[in-house]
Amino acid sequence: MKKVFCLVFGLVLFFQPVLIWAGYSATIKAEWEYSPPSGKTLSGFRLYKDGEMACVSKKPTENTMECLVDLDPGEITFTVTAYFTDGTETGHSAPFVLEFTGPRNIAPMLHLLLGDD
């Protein structure tokens, strides 16, 4: 029984940094300027992360949005579109590329988990 506990405890310590790294989420605040074309009624905006919709704002008069997104290490591309009451959507905005290298406190966490050895 003692060996099984040590093995399970060792595996938890080994995989813990991976679990912390892979499950990182952050709130992204996007801001933009946009004037809809005449004859169109604006419904809101959509924020895309790497080409997939991440959040929707149904507030056509606001030019900011906060969105909780999952982050993986590497380059992440965000774009914004406007959508209208007739069901149409604009093309994507110019991309904003974020280089995510991981949470800032990962090094101290690894040190605490793995120790100096």
Image (spheres, grey):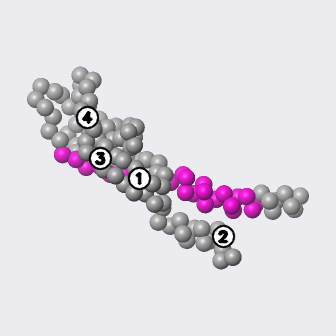
Q: Pointer 1: residues within 10 angstroms few (<14), some, or many (20+)?
A: few
The residue under the point 25% across, 25% down is 88
Identify the image quadrant of the N terminus: bottom right
Q: Rate crowding at label 4 as few (under 14), some (14 to 19) or many (20 or more) other CA atoms within 10 Å.
A: few
Picture residue at 31% right of the left edge, 43% below the top: 79
Residue at the disc numbered 1: 75
Name the front one of labels 2 and 4. Answer: 4
Instruction: Give x and y (percent) for residue 69.
Output: 43, 47
Residue type indicated by callout 3: Pro
Question: How far is the residue under mark 1 from the one under mark 3?
Answer: 12 Å
Q: Residues within 10 Å of mark 3 (few under 14, many from 20)?
A: some
User: Residue 76, how many percent across, how many down?
Assistant: 40, 50
- What amino acid type should be assigned to the residue bearing mark 2? Leu
Left of 30 or right of it: where is 24? right
The residue tagged 4 is 91
Is label 2 in contact with label 3 (beta carbons under 8 Å)? no
